[in-house]
Amino acid sequence: MTNGLNPPKQAPAAAATLPTRAGVGLKPEHFQEILATQPDIGFFEVHAENYMVPGGPFHHYLTRIREHYPLSIHGVGLSIGADGPLDVQHLNALQALLQRYQPQYFSEHLAWSAHGDTFLNDLLPLPYNTATLQRVCDHIEQVQNHLGRRLLLENPATYVEFVASTWDEGAFLTEVLRRTGCGLLLDVNNVFVSSVNHGRDARATIRAMPLKQVGEIHLAGFAEQVDGNGAPLLIDSHGAPVAQAVWDLYAFTLTLTGPQPTLLERDNDIPAWPVLLAEAGVADQKLQAMRKATQPQATTVAVEVAA
Amino acid sequence: MNSQTVFALPLLGPELPCPSGLKTWNNSDPATRYAVYRNNVVVSLIDALADTYPVLQQLVGEEFFRAMAKVFALANPPRGAVMAYYGQGLADFVASFPPAASVPYLADVARLEMARVLAYHAADVPTPPNNSLQSALTDPHQLEHMRLGLHPSVQVVASPFAVVSLWAAHQGTACLSTVDPDVPQTALVFRHALDVNTLEIAAGVGSFISALQTGQTLLAAADQANGQAASFDLSAALALLLHWQLITTMTTGDDHEPAH
């Protein structure tokens, strides 16, 4: 039924899941170049709140880019960990956005960012204890019921820990996923940043995560400071290329999870589009190597027959 | 106070100490680490304001702008997660910010810049073909009770200062040293296709458009404009709106039915 005139990317754009390839965060600076060049890339991801506007260029370009590529919508303002109720207006706006763009995935953070009627515009940390667990699970169930879809929950980058915490992060996330059925957006950079900041082994932290429920991986760059003792304090800045140590941790993670859709996040000091595309290419090479290492021979043959 | 209140208040209260209940693996002072959150919050809000108000920042300099934006942000944090519209109160804040009092046009430049953000993200509304609008506008029977609906991106910024020239001087299209800031100007801001336009219009045209936006009939709006500016030219005002395809609906009488 194909006649060679159909754009080959139509099928991935309409697929039920993101491909196990690299994707890039979509930035307005790159709208036109992406539409004009239609680069070979697995998917795009946008921040939901940036598109909670009535019309204009953001919707114009996202609509057109969505026709050609799979999409992940990533929320940064739902404040799932807040001790107050979720903002139903915000949930409604999310629902409208998800209906409009039909993204393959929707994700949010294990964090809070609103307090009362103040939006603090940062992803703030939570004590991992029974009270937080109950509240986070209640909120995730509310979100999933409201939106009628499964959520991927992202592990945060943190700079402090709480005296009141009684769980480690991996065990806490595992229990949240078990209770709510949501998936994990495994941010490998966040694991690295938090591991350095809290004196933990990054690979052990990865192993402690609920890896069977990973739906997507995030990679990003960090900034480096020092704490009050002069020990390294890493900041999840999204303003630099992915560090070699994070690439190494990513390769390690893939050996445990198998190939996963992998997003390169860059929100500050945004470089020219070819730079981001090349960084995605590095992730694609690692995914390709993992596929070759794990793919049974029979599957390869079957694909060739089908082609 | 619950634990999130304890954590949240010092984020916007630099005079408050680091909250209790925090720990660090190496027993370093939690305050240094908590400062990362303080910095993230305040810098992200200042950056959001800098994105919206680039000309204001150029007029006062980056250092002054960021100091002023910090004072504003600490007192006026966002009330929702959509950051595109954050800082709508900055113009009023600037107008009453004593260190900025020596430059009286700053607030109106800020109003113009926020108008451009609102126009950029305003709803997409199709405009009817100009010939159907033109024929309705030349029919005296329809004209009497006609109301015009304008594109949601349309905004008028009227100022006792040369806001359009001051703004344009920072777009590479004019030179700031040749701008006399004390010449009153009215700006028309709107989105045409995907671009936000900023035009200087006559004060009467601005008054006419503002009156249309409050739902007044075309003739009442024209009367109001005539009262404010003797030189108001209704046909030129309509030609401007038609040229930029800013008329989205025409209704006659009280039934608000489309005229064509």
Image (cartoon, coloured by chain):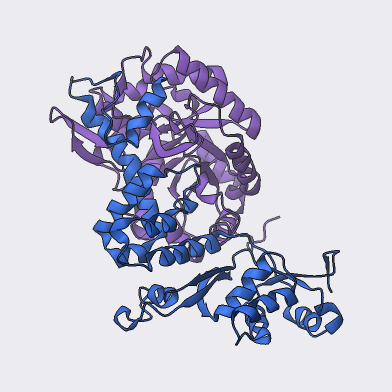
Chain colours: A purple, B blue
| Relative side of B85 to A196, left or right | right
Q: Position of residue A143 (x, y in %)?
A: 59, 30
Pick the front one: B232 or A96: B232
Can the viewer see residue B57 in this picture?
A: yes
The quadrant of the image that shows the N terminus of chain B is top left
Question: In the rendered image of this protein, does residue A146 appear above or below residue B220?
Answer: above
The quadrant of the image that shows the C terminus of chain B is bottom right
Question: In the rendered image of this protein, does residue A256 appear above or below residue B181?
Answer: above
Q: Position of residue B165 (x, y in %)?
A: 41, 78
Q: Which residue is drawn at 38% across and 75% down?
A: B166
Residue furthest to the front: B227
| Relative side of B35 to B220, left or right | left
Question: In the rendered image of this protein, does residue A173 appear above or below residue A46?
Answer: above
| Relative side of B111 to B156, left or right | left
Pick the front one: B216 or B33: B216
Q: Determine the image quadrant of residue B143.
A: bottom right
Pick the front one: B5 or B214: B214
Q: Where is residue B175 in the image (x, y as percent from the top left)?
A: 32, 81
